Amino acid sequence: MSVFPEQWQPVFQIFDQQNKEKIHGALSCFDGKPRPEGRLSDALSAAGIPCFSLDVWNHPKQDLTQSYGVQMFLDGLSRLQPRSLLWFAPPCSTYEWINRGTSGRTRELPEGRSSARMFDAEETRQFTARGLRAGSSRGHCAVEIRSLF
């Protein structure tokens, strides 16, 4: 069984105590820019499944690499009943090995270039790993999706 991230525990406990009414639904992280073909959160909501969408495209305060974005995630997580869906779709441009043009990753330098974008990529990886642990430790179906292209 996965262990809830220790550094998130105190804040989560506050939200969990405040949010007594839980829903069976979903929380979509890095949901993307609203677009005509829709997002996961849009499709779930249209099917009658409540879904919280967290993405910097929705609002700058939903930046999941910042403490205020993490707090929004923990608040949303605390509102879900066990066996709800947690969906993580981190941006491919900062997350994937395939994107060597942006990251500067090579065999000799697998971490990539040192840059603000690479720092964001590391923050994204850390958030996603912690979010997956937090969700699975609470009995949710936690999924990370990555593009193959």
Image (cartoon, rainbow, N blue to C red):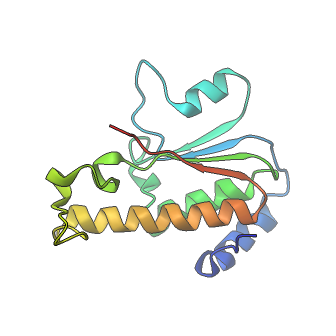
Above or below 80: residue 131: below
Left or right placement of residue 55 versus residue 96 in this view: right
Task: Identify the residue shown where x is 40% and y is 48%.
Answer: 56
Task: Identify the residue shown where x is 42% and y is 38%.
Answer: 32
Q: Quadrant of residue 104?
A: bottom left
Task: Identify the residue shown where x is 65% and y is 21%.
Answer: 46
Left or right placement of residue 8 versus residue 93 in this view: right
Task: Identify the residue shown where x is 74% and y is 73%.
Answer: 13
Above or below 60: residue 17: below
Left or right placement of residue 67 versus residue 91 in this view: right
> What percent of the width, then of the height, locates residue 130?
56, 68
> What percent of the width, then of the height, locates residue 148?
38, 40
Q: Quadrant of residue 97?
A: bottom left
> What percent of the width, then of the height, locates residue 9?
67, 77
Residue 135 visible within the image = yes
Residue 66 visible within the image = no
Asked whether 95 or 57 is in front, the reply is 95
Where the N terminus falls, by quadrant? bottom right
Asked whether 103 or 16 is in front, the reply is 103
Left or right placement of residue 32 versus residue 14 in this view: left
> What percent of the width, then of the height, locates residue 133?
63, 66
Asked whether 72 or 85 is in front, the reply is 85
Where the C terminus falls, by quadrant? top left
